[in-house]
Amino acid sequence: MEEVKCYMPSTLIEALEIKSKVDCIPLAGGSDLMVAHKRTLGLTPKFDKPVMIIRNLPELRKIYINEKGECVIGSGCTSTEIAENTLCPWHLRQAASRMGAIGLRNSATIGGNIANASPKGDTPGPLYLLDARVKLSSVNGEREELVSDFIVKFRTLDLKSDELITEVIVPYSEDDFDYIFWHKVGTRKANAISKITLSQAIKFAEDGTVADYRVSATATGAKTNRSRDVENIIIGKKISAELIEDVIKAFDGVISPRAMPEFRREATRRMIRRFLSVAATHPENKVIDTYDDYHVTGQPEPRRK
Amino acid sequence: MVAEDISKAVRRVDAVAKSNGTAKYVPDYDFGDCLWARMIRSSIPRGKILNINLPELPEGYTFVSYKDIPEGGKNYLHMIATDWKCFAEDEVRYVGETIGLLVGPDKTKLEDLLEQVKVDYEEMEAATTIDEGVACKGGAFVNDNNIHCHLKLEVGKPDEAFAKAAKIVEETIETGFQEHIYLETNGACCVPEKNGEYTVYASAQCPFYIRKSIAPLLNISPEKITVKQTTTGGAFGGKEHFPDVLCGPLLVAAHKTGKTVKMIFDREEDVEFSVKRHPSKVVFKTGLDENGNIVAMDSKVYYNVGGYLASSFVVLQRGCFHVTGCYEFPNFRTEGFGVATNTFPSCAFRGFGAPQTLFAIETHMCHLAEMQGLDPLEYKRRYFIKQGGITSTNGKIVERVMIPEMLDQVLKASDYERKIKEYGTGKGKGIGISFYNHGGAFTGNGEQAIIKGKCKLRKYKDGTVEILCGQTEMGQGFHTILPKIAAHVLEIPIEKVIFDDPNTSRVPDSGPTAASRSTMIVGELVERAATLMKPRYDKEEEFEVMTEYEHPEGYPWDQSTFQGYAYLGYGWGVCAVEVEVDPCTAEITTKGVWSSHDCGHLIDEKIVHGQVNGGILQGLGWGSTEVLENVKGHFKQTSISSYIVPTSMDFPKQGVYFVENPYEWGPFGAKGMGELVFNGSAAAYIDAVSRAIGKRICSIPCPTETVMNYMLNGKDIKEAL
Amino acid sequence: MDAKISFKLNGKNVSITTDPLRRLLDILRDDFKLTGVKEGCSEGECGACSVLLNGKIVTSCIIPIGAVDGQEVMTIEGVSATEGGKIIVEAFADGGAVQCGFCIPGMVIAAYYLLSNNPNPTDDEIRLGISGNICRCTGYDLIVESIKLAAERGEKIWKK
């Protein structure tokens, strides 16, 4: 077998130049790619294209708030870095903190998690919910695109061959909502792959109507599910039991789980019903979970700005 | 000098080397200029091999198959039965069956070649479940009915009792495959020596089993093969017979090439292509009188044996012997069937057939109580077996049964009685309880009639004493237990006792490290040898003593009819589990786990504590998340990310209790316990979950999605059977 | 396509010329003979191959050696020789944390990483800290107890 070429740029510019000339696979944390291409014990993973290692590019490892107040996360930031950084929105931090094993979280990056385009990926749920964008850079310039558009379908991205994901920009955070919800049903309590994860957020107007409501679901179809049409059912109205059921029914039509459909659908219905009906009572705690005294209830850790 | 109680914990002799990374497991050995082997396996569950298409093999690369077995050699592995072939010849019976080895010096090149191997088959219809096996789907391939093995036991007069019963109810309880997930995958290395001899290094439980199993391949005596156990990273039964499946082909490869050949499984192949716990199906028919008392019970026990019988008849026997659990029923019958299917052969796994039937009887007893509106605990209490009680094999319980004392400990620690009333059923919280036992050592007089275990102690000039026996350390603590026993008798420091990983050329065969027999039987051999050595210890510089197992008189056993005293010493257990169910997602959170065990007198309280913790957790995994599906002969879960064993976050700290009940024939009163501690936690967990959701659960594993399914569609826990 | 990779390994500067896509795990085990690093799952799930990369716990089976150029790696061989590492090894031995031992080098690394960042962890924090390390023998309870013991015994070291 012929060995594939491996590039090890030390700056982003160098990386973009390589990318402009060579069709290569960017490899950051390795948690998906090294496993997908593994062979048996002791052997070098087998790639069918050249690889470019971008794990240590300093330009991709920053987290900051930009002039518009949006959270900007370098695509090379690891799950641990995101989970531990209170600049990052709550939903995303929750997802990052429950992704895989600890050792893996110190490797896995947000850019890689998006690029893997798996419906079970942990970060797309919150990113869809918060209208996050990716910044795509090449030697010819930059462009931004919603994560939900960028991930076209399972394992497919809207990415040109000379582009790299360099940043993830999250315009919303929990500060924009009155109540928030994030719940992952994993294969086990830690070190788990998602069976279903639901992210939700709601904001009320002064008259008690819903000013904004969002819901996204992971592992319920070919890609992460979110639908503004479904959310609009309840936006501008007061929460009622009937409206909640309308939202549930409409969202049920959006998701398309293949494996364990009954479980995934029912858990989704119940989590939406729970969140909206509890939020309607305007409880003191901002974080609502699947039942009281469970997991993450209470107030989120204050954001550091 | 009166020594302190042996139970007081000492530091395990292997702990530091294993913690700082200096302990050497088989993948850590550098065998120098050796060849590597990769297996070519069947990719279909049943069919005929038409052609094996190999790529052109460069110099130094070899294909090894049954054709390389020399004249006079036999193409089988001796694993109690001799039906499991070392290499498939013209037919294959399961996905993963060994067809051949590809052997060569460079691992990468070898893998490239392996990817080019193509086997043509004439595929046949496969049976993969118990029901399909019994129905002879695709035509029987074992006997004329796909039944590998069968037995029947009867106590009292069940037919007469059924005829008089006021009511007869039926129920089926099922359990699934379970994968061992020892952290170290299987690996072995075979080194050809001079004079046609071989040395085998293996991660294994039973070095003497390997020797005996593979020697017939080359038609040589077992003594020509030296098996050296390497530090073994977990086994749980999965390395009792299964290492033969690696070592046999490696022996033939070493014979063919004249070179050292090494093979280490990666995790994926170890999960996909290794033995598993037998899936089971137990069909109960129970006769009740007008007050709901059990007057007769009939059970049909089906185990999914897979393509070859190997050790499974013994597993099925133990399953049938344990189907009465901790209870005595006046009229009872059980019939066991080892069903042939086209799945990877099932084999030993901690509990060796007992956990399946114990889960079945515990669950059935709960359901009998619930449907009558009775408290399961109160119902079970009516039937607890006592000393002198009649067992499923018409023997008697020899020892004192301390279930009442153990139950008291668990009730108190778990606050069971308050919680069971407060939680009710179907209200999101539940507490469950189970009772279980495990017969120690080989069945009946097997230790004397079959195993004939021997053990030697050798004293050296410098005062050190070496233990020579075939018992292995695989994590259970035996490297500490045995020296502790010898040191305690001889009243010398444990550091003066040497006990190395066995080498079959140096040590006598003391029998396998299996069946919860090592402490109970071999520990007693060491205790006795040390007692013989003690009066001579100061007087003689260098000498040896040897002991051999003798079965106590007066406890007959007939292996042809399975009648008599199956076990002289049982371990006993009580376990309570408390859970909470998430009303939105059906996720189960376990709030508490409490257990009490009777393992006789403890040789080391910390080692036993660790066994309890690990066994109970493994049982909880079996009952909850450890889903292993077989789809058309292929296991669907093939990695640690898809086959879900518990992490440190899945279950809480356990409450661990013991009762003191010294066993007359064990060293310092100790009994077997390594398997016992696995046997009951799944039943307690399922009892708790079913109470929390108010639905009857009849099978395991029971992961989140299954709990949800029961919540939506399950039968009410109180519904009539 | 080989490349020269230089990094710090257990405190020493080393370099190796090799395929940058080879796994760090294989480099450590096969080239540097650091066989205390174990391979349990090959997919970053079980934690047996844990090492510290720039002081953070990572699973070495998913890291290409090319990503380690210019970085700092500590294996169990290095960690167990440190003052803190020795305390953990001793606490594991005294606390009954070890059974088959195959997960234990990785578990020691996890304990070291935890205590270095949180000298006084609660039981729950310890459970979280070792949740990336699968153990099939012990049921974890005595590992948790042993890490508590190491926290107590090494109080002065961890607080540094």
Image (cartoon, coloured by chain):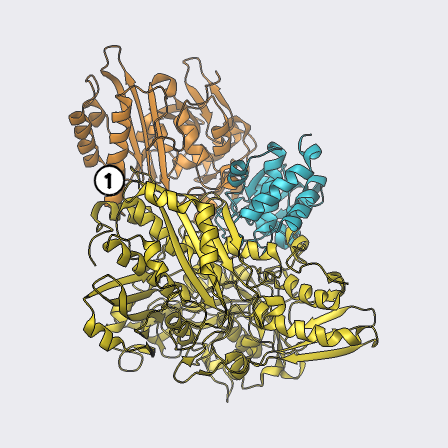
Q: Is residue B700 visible?
A: no
Give residue B73's position: percent from left, percent from top.
50, 86
In the depicted structure, whether residue B288 falls above or below residue A268: below
Where residue B415 sits, quadrant-wise, is top left
Judge by depth and name the residue closer to the eye, B571 or B589. B571
- Residue C67 position, x and y percent, is 56, 40
Q: Residue furthest top?
A: A206
Q: Is residue A296 visible?
A: yes
Q: Colour of chain C?
A: cyan
Which of C141 and B549 lies nearest the eye of the viewer?
Answer: B549
The kind of residue on which mark 1 rests is: Glu
- Residue that mark 1 sits on: A266
- Residue at position x 38%, y 65% in the image: B325
Q: Residue at x 68, y 63 (%)?
A: B484
Q: Quadrant of residue B272?
A: bottom left
Q: Residue A72 is drawn in which quadrant?
A: top left
| B565 is higher (above) or lower (below) than B416 | below
Q: Nearer the viewer, residue B344 or B81?
A: B81
Q: Is residue B447 above or below residue B610?
A: below
Q: Which colour represents chain B?
A: yellow
Residue B43, position as x, y percentages in the image: 36, 66
- Residue sitting at the far front: B291
Q: In the drawing, does residue A64 fall left or right of residue C77?
A: left
Q: Residue A295 appears at what percent x and percent y?
A: 40, 33
Chain A pictured colour: orange
From the viewer's side, name the closer residue of B375 and C146: B375
Label 1 CA crowd tier, 10 Å (few <14, some 14–19, many 20+): many
Q: To which chain does the residue with label 1 belong? A: A
Looking at the image, residue B317 sits to the left or right of residue B497; the answer is left
Q: Secondary structure at mark 1?
A: helix
